[in-house]
């Protein structure tokens, strides 16, 4: 399929991730304006603003959701409250809980704030009480009662000398508490709905409050009365007072009166003059659709927080869709944007000349374009319903999208600024458009497939509008009813002459782009087809189906060439990599698999998602892969095949050098260093080889003991682990036992138990050691019986040669056993004693001439015994081979073991055979 020099991919590693870090709740920015703190269920994520990466994640041990948190003004202490009614103090930089105590509240804590000295913290509970805690001395200082319902807002007065606390609950009033007397000194009543935010003027004499009753109230704190009521005509969630002595003329600020910024359900920031109660500036979002003024508070464009960043002269807003936007003042231009939660990821594509950006379609009408370097996001508005599919034009920063709103759109990114805008749109389908594919050779056309069972081809105009202009209107050149059910996937061939479609009707079809004529049908899947892809080099089409299989089809005869099975559920997406020689698939089982086409083999399975993998795309350089899942995670994978191969090659070269060095050290009898190198290679066979070399030395036991005792503890641990393996084999059990003898002799039980896995290793040694001892015992018992029989078969007399020949078989072993001639054994043997008496009688009865005849007879008998003994041994061995057919390795090893262990078990038979 490709050049022979092409290397197959074997592995990918996670390069980076875009994962959810905020799912609603409180958001706070550190006072040095470097980090954003966001609650996400039982976790509190800390996002670094410069890189957009989650650098810390604090999680509750009890997995209870965090209901509120607060960061001290000195950015040192973080306190969290959970549904378990616990308050926890954290060293957030170390992700370590330093203190935990009961909140005393009977119900969860709803709000929390520090004073400016970072010593007092106030907690407002759902039980209508407020408690103040001294975090330094660690005790509760105040218990303030009087609020009705949930206390959802608490704030200290910026002037700590006043010792005043402001709170608001469900009664819509703002209470002022005197901490000296622990009493409520005043209730500020103006709002008729929940108070959402409080902002103090720099001198502390003025307070601006916002509420969901669509008004903002300016309070004179000296007189404790209403100074001005400002109707804002939207439910306001956040209010920020603009700093003094700054030029905000771009925001319509022309006087030195107090001005404040509001953020609410309309999704835009507005600047108000407090003295005249009029709006002097309204933010415009050119790419966003205009919200309905009567829209409910659940509008995804609405703002839920507005936070000041005075050091960098910025504002931060949080949208109902969990997006965090940083605006630069006074221009109110978006500087950075972070997406806290993406919902289901339906499609992803690399974008840009060097794949610097990715475009993401989520379960939303908005498209998100992420910059990979900073994770900063640009949100694209245009579609009015969920975007279902994406595709990119090659060699240009353009892409197409289709959605449930029955439309297709074409977008272009400015390569210099990274700004993306819509350049064309087309309407014509009668149902949701589920798939779109762009032309490959040039930006000339695109093909779409819809749930109305049709496919359409759209021509792009030569001159596309610039940024800020109205998008061009596309008209479908050809429309064709393609399938009997929903069209799930369409793809254009690499030469722009063909396109294929896959449908829920379990078929894929091949079409000519010239006249939209049907060329062939691919049948064979048992369920609907989710994805179709052309091979970049061969005339092959790949299809992925809900039946869990991937099939390759020939374009000439429409036959199935190969089938890949491995996913446990539907295969949702496939792409070709390695110049068409490999496939990558993503399934609803959350797995991503790498396949080699030639061998039908699944090379690697990647498990990084917890839900369906809907999105899959490869980079233009074929070195990166992008996956997106219904678990809201986007993962960037990097091809690490070359790195792993280089590491493996370097490792092999290093092992070769170490093997050479090991051989030299053994030859030079530098056993300690040789054993250390063998253990470092983690090769038990090589270590065994060194042990055998040491034992074969002239001073083997002493050398082995000296070498083993000089090893480090970790090396002894490895040696003990190897002994467990060696002990299971009869050929190497003696080496294992020799090592164990040294370790058990010189190391105390306490020292042995400190070894990693020592108990497991020792338990594994016991049964095999017992088995070896039982086998050696059986061999010794058999040898003792054979020795006894041979001794009983000795010659007891030599009167005539005929009698000797009749007893030739019985007397054959006599010449072999030299041990019988030892004095100690002759005295202890009854047969020998009887023979001595018989010989004495014969000597007393015979004359002096009988000595020569006796010597001749003895010599002949001795020669006959030797010959017969050799014959018996040969026949015994032959019979053993004949009966078994072969000599087992265990029997041969048993013989070797018995001979080698004869010094420990001095049996006459073993000693005789050794001699």
Image (tube, rainbow, N blue to C red):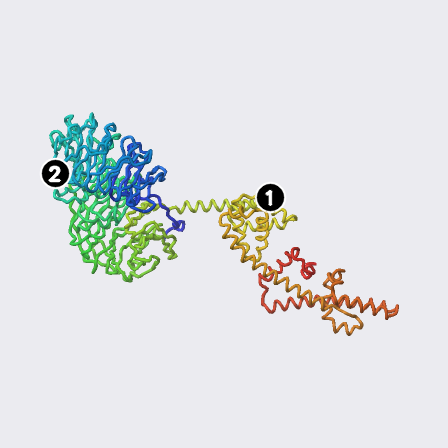
- Rounded to the nearest angstrom, the CA distance separating label 1 from label 2 is 90 Å
Q: From this view, report whether residue 205 is shown above or below residue 462.
A: above
Query: In the visual, does 668 lie left or right of 168?
Result: right
**Camera-nearest residue between 78 and 83:** 83
Q: Quadrant of residue 872?
A: bottom right
Task: For marks 1 and 2, give the one nearer the viewer.
Answer: 2
**Camera-nearest residue between 125 and 506:** 125
- Sequence order check: which comes first, mark 1 or mark 2? 2
Residue found at the far front of this picture:
181
Q: Residue at x 62, y 50 (%)?
A: 695
Looking at the rendered structure, which numbered label has been put on residue 233? 2
**Camera-nearest residue between 530 and 732:** 732
Q: Secondary structure at mark 1?
A: loop
Q: Position of residue 269 (x, y in %)?
A: 17, 36
Query: In the visual, does 98 lie left or right of 460?
Result: right
Q: Position of residue 51 (x, y in %)?
A: 31, 37
Looking at the rendered structure, which numbered label has been put on residue 670? 1
């Amino acid at each position: 399929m490709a050049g022979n020099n092409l290397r197959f991919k074997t592995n990918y590693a996670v390069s980076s991730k875009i994962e959810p870090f905020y799912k609603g709740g409180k958001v706070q920015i550190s006072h040095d304006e470097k980090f954003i703190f966001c609650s996400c269920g039982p976790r509190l994520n800390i996002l670094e603003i410069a890189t957009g990466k989650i650098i810390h994640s604090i999680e509750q041990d009890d997995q209870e959701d965090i209901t509120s948190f607060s960061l001290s003004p000195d950015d040192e202490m973080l306190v969290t409250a959970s549904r378990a009614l616990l308050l926890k103090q954290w060293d957030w930089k170390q992700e370590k809980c330093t203190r935990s105590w009961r909140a005393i509240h009977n119900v969860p804590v709803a709000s929390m704030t520090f004073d400016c000295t970072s010593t007092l913290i106030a907690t407002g509970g759902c039980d209508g009480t407020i408690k103040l805690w001294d975090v330094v001395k660690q005790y509760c200082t105040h218990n303030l009662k009087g609020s009705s319902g949930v206390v959802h807002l608490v704030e200290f007065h910026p002037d700590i000398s006043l010792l005043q606390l402001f709170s608001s609950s469900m009664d819509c009033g703002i209470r002022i508490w005197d901490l000296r007397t622990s009493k409520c000194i005043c209730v500020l009543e103006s709002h008729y709905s929940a108070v959402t935010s409080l902002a103090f003027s720099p001198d502390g004499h003025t307070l601006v409050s916002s509420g969901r009753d669509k008004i903002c109230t300016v309070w004179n704190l000296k007189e404790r009365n209403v100074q001005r009521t400002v109707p804002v005509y939207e439910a306001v969630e956040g209010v920020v007072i603009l700093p003094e002595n700054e030029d905000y003329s771009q925001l319509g600020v022309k006087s030195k009166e107090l001005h404040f910024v509001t953020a609410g359900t309309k999704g835009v920031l507005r600047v108000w003059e407090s003295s005249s109660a009029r709006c002097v500036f309204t933010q415009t979002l050119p790419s966003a659709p205009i919200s309905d003024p009567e829209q409910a508070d659940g509008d995804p464009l609405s703002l839920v927080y507005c936070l000041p960043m005075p050091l960098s002269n910025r504002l931060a807003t949080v949208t109902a869709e969990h997006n965090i936007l940083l605006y630069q003042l006074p221009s109110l231009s978006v500087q950075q944007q972070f997406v806290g939660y993406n919902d289901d990821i339906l499609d992803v594509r690399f974008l840009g000349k060097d794949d610097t950006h990715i475009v993401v379609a989520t379960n939303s009408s908005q498209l998100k374009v992420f910059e990979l370097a900073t994770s900063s996001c640009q949100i694209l508005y245009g579609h009015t319903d969920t975007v279902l599919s994406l595709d990119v034009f090659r060699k240009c920063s353009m892409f197409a999208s289709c959605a449930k709103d029955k439309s297709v759109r074409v977008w272009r990114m400015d390569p210099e600024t990274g700004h993306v805008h819509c350049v064309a749109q087309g309407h014509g389908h009668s149902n949701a458009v589920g798939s779109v594919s762009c032309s490959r050779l040039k930006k000339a056309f695109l093909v779409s497939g819809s749930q109305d069972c049709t496919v359409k081809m759209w021509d792009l105009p030569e001159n596309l509008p610039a940024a800020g202009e109205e998008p061009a209107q596309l008209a479908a050149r050809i429309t064709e009813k393609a399938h009997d059910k929903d069209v799930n996937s369409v793809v254009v061939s690499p030469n722009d002459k063909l396109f294929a479609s896959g449908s829920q009707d379990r078929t894929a079809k091949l079409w000519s782009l010239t006249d939209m004529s049907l060329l062939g049908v691919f049948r064979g899947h048992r369920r609907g087809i989710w994805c179709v892809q052309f091979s970049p080099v061969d005339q092959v089409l790949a299809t992925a189906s809900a039946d869990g299989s991937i099939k390759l089809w020939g374009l000439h005869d429409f036959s199935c060439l190969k089938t890949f099975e491995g996913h446990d559920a539907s295969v949702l997406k496939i792409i070709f990599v390695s110049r068409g020689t490999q496939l990558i698939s993503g399934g609803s089982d959350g797995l991503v698999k790498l396949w080699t086409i030639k061998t039908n083999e699944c090379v690697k399975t990647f498990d990084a998602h917890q839900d369906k993998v809907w999105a899959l795309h490869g980079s233009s350089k074929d070195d990166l892969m992008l996956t997106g899942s219904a678990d809201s995670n986007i993962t960037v994978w990097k091809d690490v095949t070359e790195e792993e191969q280089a590491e493996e090659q370097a490792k092999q070269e290093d092992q070769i050098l170490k093997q050479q060095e090991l051989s030299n050290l053994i030859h030079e009898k530098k056993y300690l260093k040789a054993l250390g190198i063998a253990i470092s290679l983690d090769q038990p066979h090589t270590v065994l080889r060194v042990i055998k070399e040491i034992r074969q030395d002239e001073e083997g036991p002493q050398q082995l003991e000296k070498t083993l005792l000089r090893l480090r503890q970790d090396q002894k641990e490895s040696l003990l682990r190897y002994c467990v393996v060696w002990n299971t084999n009869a050929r190497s059990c003696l080496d294992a036992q020799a090592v164990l003898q040294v370790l058990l002799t010189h190391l105390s039980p306490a020292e042995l138990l400190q070894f990693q896995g020592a108990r497991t290793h020792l338990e594994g040694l016991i049964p095999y050691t017992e088995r070896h001892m039982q086998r050696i015992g059986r061999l010794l018992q058999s040898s003792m019986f054979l020795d006894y029989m041979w001794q009983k078969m000795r010659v007891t007399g030599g009167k005539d040669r005929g009698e000797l020949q009749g007893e030739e078989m019985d007397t054959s072993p006599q010449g072999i056993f030299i041990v019988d001639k030892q004095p100690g054994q002759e005295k202890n043997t009854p047969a020998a004693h009887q023979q001595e008496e018989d010989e004495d009688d014969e000597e007393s009865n015979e004359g002096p001439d009988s000595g020569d005849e006796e010597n001749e007879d003895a010599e002949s008998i001795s020669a006959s015994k030797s010959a017969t003994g050799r014959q018996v041994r040969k026949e015994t061995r032959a019979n053993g081979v004949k009966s078994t057919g072969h000599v087992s390795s265990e029997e041969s090893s048993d013989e070797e073991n018995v001979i080698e262990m004869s010094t420990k078990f001095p049996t006459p038979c073993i000693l005789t055979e050794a001699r």
